Image: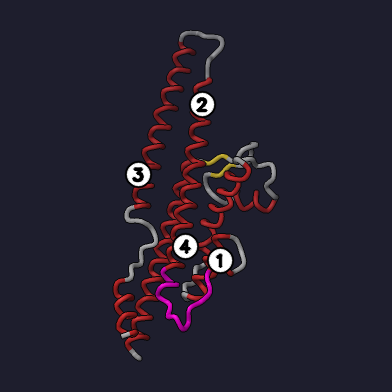
Amino acid sequence: MKTYLRALMLNEMGTDTLDLYEIELFVWYAKETEAVLQKMLSSELAYIREQSAQGNSEINDSGIVAVDYFARRIRYSHVIYLVSMLESCLERACSTLMTMTSQETKPFGPTELKGDHWTRRRRFLERYGSLKIPNDLWTAPEMLISVRNCLVHENGSTANLSDDKRKRIGEFPGLDISGPELKIEQSYVQHALQALRALVKHIEDGIRKAIEESKKTLAAR
């Protein structure tokens, strides 16, 4: 009976780590907000050209400042939400692994490992799920976490960034630390999104494989 119930549980277990269409909905949301930003910017640039055509000696460009502020806050929010999706993916993957692991070999939880919130979950998946996450898949999400921490804890200020962190940030498209505040372009949001999509797929494929291996082990008993 115990073996039967465990086999039934494995058969019913899903591999999704994010809600259905969550990434696709974010793609739509990011595209729509970017369209709004471009419309706002076009309107303000048209107003500046109109003033110039009228021969105004003092051009009122305060609208551009407002659009820049709006764009900065929107893209900051994009980064924060992408990290939230990454966190959800890792947490649900760990939860699935804990559920599918037999009681006899039940590992301790990811919170008992060393490292930050995200690294602990990566180590847990790798150690107990045999779900190796290659460094080339982890590098971009790791930078995404660093950018998020800068936004959340420093409000985007670049003053306290170390030389090493500045060098690493400079390797990613759409990130600018030349000013007092971290500037994020649409290209970085898209880059981070594609990196997250690749990582989620890799993790879900790994969970699917782990479930199949558990089924084979159970069937051989």
Residues at discs 1 and 4 in contact (Cβ within 8 Å):
no
Relative side of 84 to 143, left or right: left
Q: Nearer the viewer, mark 1 or mark 4?
A: 1
83 over 37 or under it: above or below: below
- As measured in the structure, the alpha-carbon distance from the residue carrying label 4 to the one carrying label 3 is 23 Å
Count of all numbered marks drawn on residues in the image? 4
Q: Earlier in the sequence, mark 2 or mark 3?
A: 3
Residue ID for mark 3? 28
Location of the C terminus by quadrant is bottom left
Q: Nearer the viewer, residue 130 or 104?
A: 104
- As measured in the structure, the alpha-carbon distance from the residue carrying label 1 to the one carrying label 4 is 12 Å
The kind of residue tagged 1 is Thr
- The residue carrying pointer 1 sits among few (fewer than 14), some (14 to 19) or many (20 or more) residues within 10 Å by Cα, namely few
What residue lies at 40% left-to-right and 71% top-to-bottom?
A: 207
Q: Nearer the viewer, mark 1 or mark 3?
A: 1
Residue 149: say if magenta: no
Q: Which mark is residue 66?
A: 2
93 over 145 or under it: above or below: below
Q: Earlier in the sequence, mark 1 or mark 2?
A: 2
Residues at discs 2 and 4 in contact (Cβ within 8 Å):
no
- The residue carrying pointer 3 sits among few (fewer than 14), some (14 to 19) or many (20 or more) residues within 10 Å by Cα, namely few
150 over 130 or under it: above or below: above
Percent coordinates x, y for residue 88 in the rendering: 45, 57
Residue ID for mark 1? 111
- As measured in the structure, the alpha-carbon distance from the residue carrying label 2 to the one carrying label 3 is 24 Å
Relative side of 110 to 165, left or right: left
Segment colored magenta = 96-109
What residue lies at 49% left-to-right and 22% top-to-bottom?
A: 63
Q: How is the image coloured?
A: secondary structure
The kind of residue tagged 4 is Leu
Q: Nearer the viewer, residue 123 or 202?
A: 123
